[in-house]
Amino acid sequence: MKNLKIGNTAYNLLVEKFTLKKKNILMHKKFLEDNPKLYNDLTTRLIADCLYYVIGSKTICEWYDIYSVNDKHLQNAAKIALKDVGIL
C-alpha cells in the first residue's frame, strides 16, 4: 500500500496501464535516450509522456479535482509506478 495523495485506486491503475504498455514505453525510452536534444531531463520527459500515453489528458484533469493534486503529485506517483514495473 503506497501513501500517495492520488490514492491507491489511481496508483494501481497507473501500474496496470504501465504494465500493459511496458514494451512500447521501453521503446519510447530508448528513442529518447538516442535523441537527447528532445528533452532536458530524461526521467521528467518520460514520466510526462507516459502519463499522457496511458491515461490521457482528460483523466489527468479529472484527477486534479478528484484527488486535489497538482502536476508534482502525479509525476511522483507515475515515477514510483514506473519504478515498480521496472521501466525506471
Image (spheres, rainbow, N blue to C red):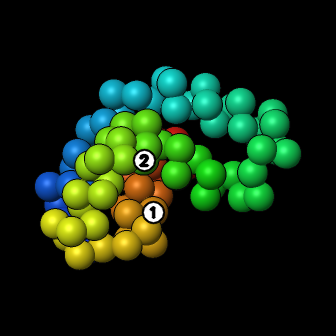
Question: Residue 81 location in percent, x, y?
Answer: 38, 52
Q: Residue at x 29, y 47 (%)?
A: 58
Query: Which residue is identified by label 1?
Result: 75
As drawn, the label of residue 51 is 2
Question: Residue 82 location in percent, x, y?
Answer: 45, 48
Q: Could you tell me which secondary element the residue under label 2 belongs to?
A: helix
Q: Amino acid at mark 1?
A: Gln
81 or 67, which is in the foreground?
67
Q: Residue at x 69, y 52 (%)?
A: 42
Q: Amino acid at mark 2?
A: Leu
Q: Residue furthest right?
A: 37
Vertical side of 81 occupied by 87: above or below: above
Please rate how many residues cluster around mark 1, counting C-alpha atoms within 10 Å: few if below 14, some from 14 to 19, many from 20: some
Question: Residue 12 location in percent, x, y?
Answer: 22, 50
Label 2 to label 1, Cα distance in Å? 8 Å
Residue 69, picture quadrant:
bottom left
Q: Could you tell me which secondary element the residue under label 1 belongs to?
A: helix
Q: Residue at x 41, y 56 (%)?
A: 78
Residue 81 in view = yes
- Quadrant where the N terminus is found in the figure: bottom left
Q: Is residue 28 left or right of residue 69?
A: right
Question: Residue 28 location in percent, x, y?
Answer: 61, 31
Q: Residue at x 43, y 43 (%)?
A: 52
Q: Is residue 20 left or right of residue 1?
A: right
Residue 85 in view = no
User: Do callouts 2 and 1 mark residues in contact (Cβ within 8 Å)?
Assistant: yes
Residue 63, picture quadrant:
bottom left
Q: How many marks?
A: 2
